[in-house]
Amino acid sequence: MSGRPIIAEGWGLRPQLVAPVIDSPRRMVVMVPTPEFRDHQVRELPRAGAIGARVSDPARAQRNRLARDRILADEVAAHFAELVE
């Protein structure tokens, strides 16, 4: 290993999936969006704000998606914290 930090990017890529393939989780860089950044994405990026035409309540679908993303971000941060304790 090079001793450099490891950045593994991907929506579903969790720290606990990366940890087994590196020599130390302390070399991992885990990026988790803040709620403010996620709100900015939804406002500014058409694909981030798109829900699709097949939902009966697009506003509710968007709220649910943002809530799911926040839960996921919190879980990623918690799992990373456990790995580096």
Image (cartoon, rainbow, N blue to C red):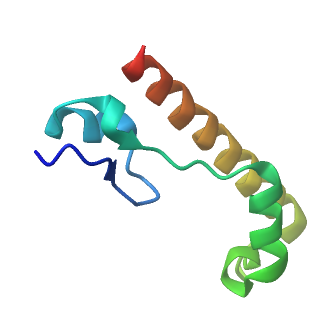
Q: Splitting the image into 4 quarters, where does residue 18 fall? A: top left
* Residue 23: percent from left, percent from top: 16, 32
> Furthest-left residue in view?
1
Q: Quadrant of the C terminus?
A: top left
Q: Nearer the viewer, residue 59 or 26?
A: 26
Q: Is residue 37 left or right of residue 79?
A: right
Q: Splitting the image into 4 quarters, where does residue 37 fall? A: bottom right
Q: Is residue 25 left or right of residue 55?
A: left
The residue shown at (85%, 76%) is 43
The residue shown at (73%, 49%) is 34
Q: Is residue 56 visible?
A: no
* Residue 31: percent from left, percent from top: 53, 50
Residue 62 vertical placement versus 26 (above, below): below
Q: Is residue 46 left or right of residue 12?
A: right
The residue shown at (82%, 69%) is 40
* Residue 46: percent from left, percent from top: 73, 86
Q: Nearer the viewer, residue 70 or 54?
A: 70
Q: Nearer the viewer, residue 2 or 50?
A: 2
